[in-house]
Amino acid sequence: MTTRESIDSFINKCESAILYAEEQYEQGRRQEHYHDVEYSDALHELESMTQQIQKMADSANAQQREQLHRVRLKVQQLQNKMILLDHDRPIYSTWH
């Protein structure tokens, strides 16, 4: 059984990763390809969070699984948004 403190600590860690990824998404949206490493790191961190959420959910009670499920949805929605952003496109293109 996962303790309440470990779930709370983990959810706080997820929220921090989400905030960092949101910042990278906004920078990527505005500046496109200038922050590739940070953008990629944020996506990698979100993927890591998704995997850790699943592991924690395996030993959590029903209430904790619900909390983890809500965080997982946030993480996955942000991952999808970041993946769909045309981040690698140059600012000025000759292609129309």
Image: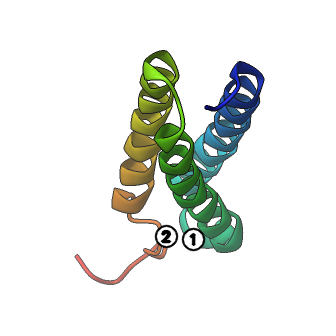
- Indicate the secondary structure of the residue bearing disc 2: loop
Point out residue 66 in the picture as x, y percentages from the top left corner. 42, 22
- Indicate the secondary structure of the residue bearing disc 1: helix
Q: Residues within 10 Å of mark 1 (few under 14, many from 20)?
A: some
**Residue nearer the viewer, 59 or 38:** 59
Q: Residues within 10 Å of mark 2 (few under 14, many from 20)?
A: few
Point out residue 32 in the picture as x, y percentages from the top left corner. 54, 63
Q: Is residue 63 above or below residue 23?
A: above
Q: CA distance from mark 1 to mark 2?
A: 8 Å
Q: Amino acid at mark 1?
A: His
**Residue nearer the viewer, 26 or 92:** 26
Point out residue 40 in the picture as x, y percentages from the top left corner. 60, 69
Q: Which label number is shown at residue 33? A: 1
> Going by the image, does 82 lie left or right of 28?
left
Mark 2 or mark 1, which is nearer the start of the sequence? Answer: 1
* Picture residue at 38% right of the left edge, 49% below the top: 81
Q: Are marks 1 and 2 in contact (CB under 8 Å)?
A: yes
For the C terminus, the image quarter is bottom left
Instruction: Write down the quadrant of residue 6 in the picture.
Output: top right
Residue picked out by circle 2: 91
Q: Amino acid at mark 2?
A: Ile
> Going by the image, does 95 lie left or right of 54?
left
Instruction: Write down the quadrant of residue 38 in the picture.
Output: bottom right
Badge count: 2
* Picture residue at 39% right of the left edge, 79% below the top: 93
Outermost residue, front side: 1
Q: Nearer the viewer, mark 1 or mark 2?
A: 1
Point out residue 26 in the picture as x, y percentages from the top left corner. 57, 44
Q: Is residue 75 above or below residue 47?
A: above
User: What colouring method underlies this structural image?
Assistant: rainbow
